[in-house]
Amino acid sequence: MSEKVHEPIVPPTTCDTDPRAILTDAEQSMYDEVLKHFSDPAYSTPGIKEKGELTEAEKFWLSRECLLRYLRAVKWKSTAAAILRLEATLKWRREYGIYDVVSTSHVEPEAVTGKQVLFGYDVRGRPGLYLFPSRQNTEEPTRQIQFTVWMLERTIDLMNPGVEALALLINYGDKAKNPSLSVARTVLNILQDHYPERLGAALILNVPFYLNMFYKLINPFIDPVSREKMKFNPRTVEDNLFTGDMLMAEWWGGDRDFEYTHEKYWPALVKLCESRQEMSLSKWRALGGTVGLKEWDYKGGAMNQPEEPREEGDAEEDAEEDVEKVTELPAHVDEVTPLAVAV
């Protein structure tokens, strides 16, 4: 067994070329229409009580990849549908307090037991977000949900150029506590509405009986792409989902003897994420600081790749690992359910 590890791992580089560089003519046209809408100097977010003009943080969030994620989330059906969802998220992010209320100091009391841990990256470079329901340490649901949102934002900070999704690892063992259904429902709605196209894989260990029955009931309603992302009791290294050096040894069979010590892990995570935020924001400003800039460019990816049109049938094939096809499911059930019911 290797020596104890107490800190997160710096993201590896996994993409040599921008996976979103080339769109079909139809996709490019739709993207241009959405970009034009949010680039209008007179644009104001509908429903905002105070000033609806975009802040710098909101323009930064509205990257090229972000606009494309929302277009994929509506299955390229219409620009109006994508714009509607984007504006709903802009409004939610401001009102929920993503940029002020949901701060590091505010959510830290939720983190002291290590019930959610960012550690390692799967073979596609997607950050691993571990959930340990047995380590639940609080009763107040509002801050529990805010902590989950904060962790999702930090997961995004640790996504290198070309990576847009996360790998979720949930262990229901060790006498995991049953989650509140109201909390699960709220988290599920937030994930579906405001973090589309973000789940790359959900690896689940020691599923309790009631959740096992629940998943069996909804399985027929889940489309094949989403179903493929959910793996129960996987052999994580043997199945080539993670390499051993990127995976916790306990429960998951990796090589890293990770031990959660809050005083060591938390400051290291915060420092790593803040440094990456500052670097990306600085590059974004240097590139013009406006809506629609490429994450690939300001996160450090290779520059100046050609953007040649491709055939209409190629888009879905190239984006298959991240595309989440939406099916009509009962009571808002879809592939983000594992995270919601583990919070």
Image (cartoon, rainbow, N blue to C red):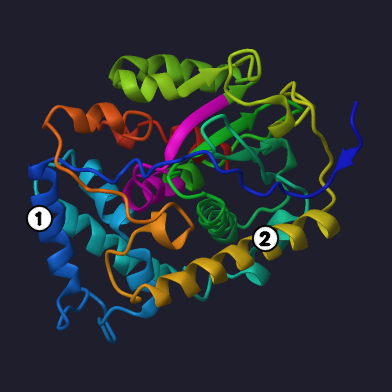
Is 66 displayed left or right of 216 in the figure?
left
Is 175 displayed left or right of 41 in the figure?
right
- The alpha-carbon separation of the residues under discs 1 and 2 comes to 37 Å
At x 18% / y 63%, what residue is drawn? 35
Amino acid type assigned to the residue bearing label 1 in the image: Ala
Q: Name the residue beneath numbered marker 1.
A: 80
Looking at the image, can residue 339 be seen? yes
- Quadrant hosting residue 233: top right
Give whichever of 135, 15 is nearer the camera: 15
Q: Of tags 1 and 2, which is closer to the observer?
A: 2
Residue 303, placed above or below residue 324:
below
Does 97 appear in magenta?
no
At x 30% / y 44%, what residue is drawn? 20
Give percent across and percent down for residue 47: 21, 74
Residue 283, placed above or below residue 246:
below
Give whichever of 262, 303 is nearer the camera: 303
Q: Name the residue beneath numbered marker 2.
A: 272
